[in-house]
Amino acid sequence: MTQMAKALLVDDRRENLMALEAILQGLPVQSVAVESGEAALKQLLVDDFAVILLDAQMPDMDGFETAGHIKRRERTRHIPIIFLTAADRDAQLALRGYAVGAVDYLTKPFDPWVLRAKVSVFVDLWSKTRQLAAQSEVVRERESQWRVLTDAVDEATALLRSDDPDARDRAVEMLEQARWGNPL
């Protein structure tokens, strides 16, 4: 079962969230919109996300503080954060965003196609990472099966080299059990 990538959209203004959802429409990503840093942190406890689009300036917990919490959590520190802000191009704010772990910092108005392209890259990376994890699990299972079979062959070989008259039958039985119980 393939899980669809999700993008967490965080902005204290509902109209901005609706605009972001419209920009991302048609991409292979499910948008999850929340209106505060606190709500974002709660959402991150229950869902996995490919990317976070985070408003830098919000009341109560701003985007920088929210990002700091996200990057301190083991479960969420790897999620790329793109800051979005209406603030004019203040280099200090951008530096602050990068300092708390952002991968990008866009000021409004931004080109929606640029944002779509950036989100697409992170969604693709998320999907590829999940595919690699699934393939790694298959490889680990195969290696485990290989070890069981190798151990059975080693034990059967030792039996066949022994002077035991029943060794051949026990070795064959051992190899058949390993083969059928742990197919490659």
Image (tube, rainbow, N blue to C red):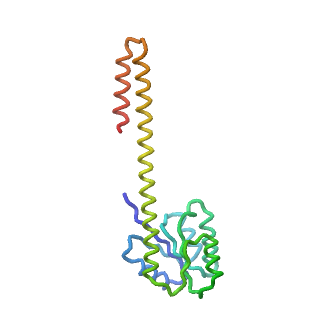
User: Is 156 left, or right, of 91 in this rendering?
Assistant: left
Q: Nearer the viewer, residue 21 or 124?
A: 124
Residue 89 lies, in percent from the top left, at 59, 86
At x 64%, y 72%, the residue is 99
Residue 114 lies, in percent from the top left, at 45, 79
Q: Splitting the image into 4 quarters, where does residue 87 fall?
A: bottom right
Residue 34 lies, in percent from the top left, at 52, 75
| Quarter of the rendering occupied by the C terminus | top left
At x 53%, y 74%, the residue is 82
Q: Is residue 184 above or below residue 70?
A: above
At x 63%, y 85%, the residue is 90
Q: Is residue 159 above or below residue 13?
A: above
User: Is 60 left, or right, of 75 in this rendering?
Assistant: right
At x 44%, y 68%, the residue is 123
Q: Splitting the image into 4 quarters, where does residue 181 fall?
A: top left
Q: Nearer the viewer, residue 138 or 114?
A: 114
Q: Is residue 109 above or below residue 29?
A: below
Residue 44 lies, in percent from the top left, at 54, 66
| Quarter of the rendering occupied by the N terminus | bottom left
